[in-house]
Each structure stands twice: as structure tokens, then as C-alpha cells.
Amino acid sequence: MRFLNYTDKLQLFISSTEEETADIDSAKNSSYPCCFEPVVSLEHQAGEVRCLHLATGEQVELSRVFLAFPGARAQSHLLRAFPVEMNEKGHAIVNPRTKETSYPGIWAIGDVAAHSQQVAIAMGDGSQAAIWIHKRLLQQD
């Protein structure tokens, strides 16, 4: 996203692990000023953000914050015990209509599957999966 289309008052605060070196390199090459000190906390007043507290003890006054988590990992470790087909990023591959995985009787939704990081999409996928789980249960009677 090109935030500079909306404001020229922008600074990135990057708190990445060594696993996310590509994210750090990308940030260093961006046109935005960057700070690589970990953010310890946010200060707010009546729910309005006012200040970032950095690990160095520095405080940065601000009025808006946009959080992004590049390098977020799919939390699909519970599926490792089953022969569920996964993509290269560790997301379960599901039937787009039923949300069932390649292993019968296991459905996956939300970030475990699509990795959209959108609550509304996960809710819709959950409703869709529930319909198909219900149908499967009715077949067993």
C-alpha cells in the first residue's frame, strides 16, 4: 500500500526476527523513514493513541498507528499429525466449496487455510464449513 498517497508524515517501526530478513531489507529500501527498535508499548488517552515507547526508552509522539505483521506464520502445527496437504507456506489446502482438507473429516478455515488475516472471511468460511460438516453428520445417521 502506498501510504504516501495519504500523508507525508509517516515512519515505519520494524520489529522483525532474523527469519524475516527479507522484510527488514524491504523496509530499508523503502522511501519511508525506518526505526528498527522494538516497540514495547503504546500509550493512549481515552482510546486515542498518543505515544510509542521503544525498547531504548525513547518515546515517539504520534496520533495514528497502522499495524502490519509481515512474515505472519500459519498456525497449522496441530495438523502435522495428519497427512493433510499443505502449500509451500504451511497453509492447509482445502476444497474451496466445503473447506474440507485432503484428509477426510478435517476442515480448515481462516489463517490456517486462506491466510487472509480477515476476521470476516474466517467467519464466512466457518459458516460454510459448518454447513458441510452438518451434511456429513446427517449422512452418518
Image: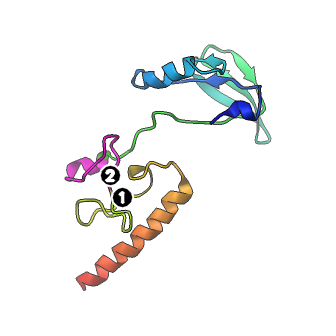
x then y, percent, for residue 38: 57, 21
Specify the quadrant that holds the N terminus. top right
Where are the magenta residues, as a range? 78-93
Indicate left or right for 123 with 112 as reference. Answer: right
x then y, percent, for residue 14: 57, 23
Assign a secondary structure to mark 2.
Answer: loop
Tag 2 and tag 1, C-beta contact below 8 Å: yes
Assign a secondary structure to mark 1.
Answer: loop
Query: For the residue marked with disc 1, what is the amino acid?
Result: Ala
Determine the main secondary structure of the stretch shown in magenta.
loop
Residue at 51% of width from left, 48% of height from top? 117
x then y, percent, for residue 5: 73, 34
Q: Is residue 1 magenta?
A: no
Q: Residue furthest bottom?
A: 141
Query: For the residue marked with disc 2, what is the amino acid?
Result: Ala
Specify the quadrant that holds the C terminus. bottom left
Location of mark 1 (residue):
108
Residue at 36% of width from left, 77% of height from top? 134
Q: Residues within 10 Å of mark 2 (few under 14, many from 20)?
A: many
Indicate left or right for 26 with 51 as reference. Answer: left
Location of mark 2 (residue):
92
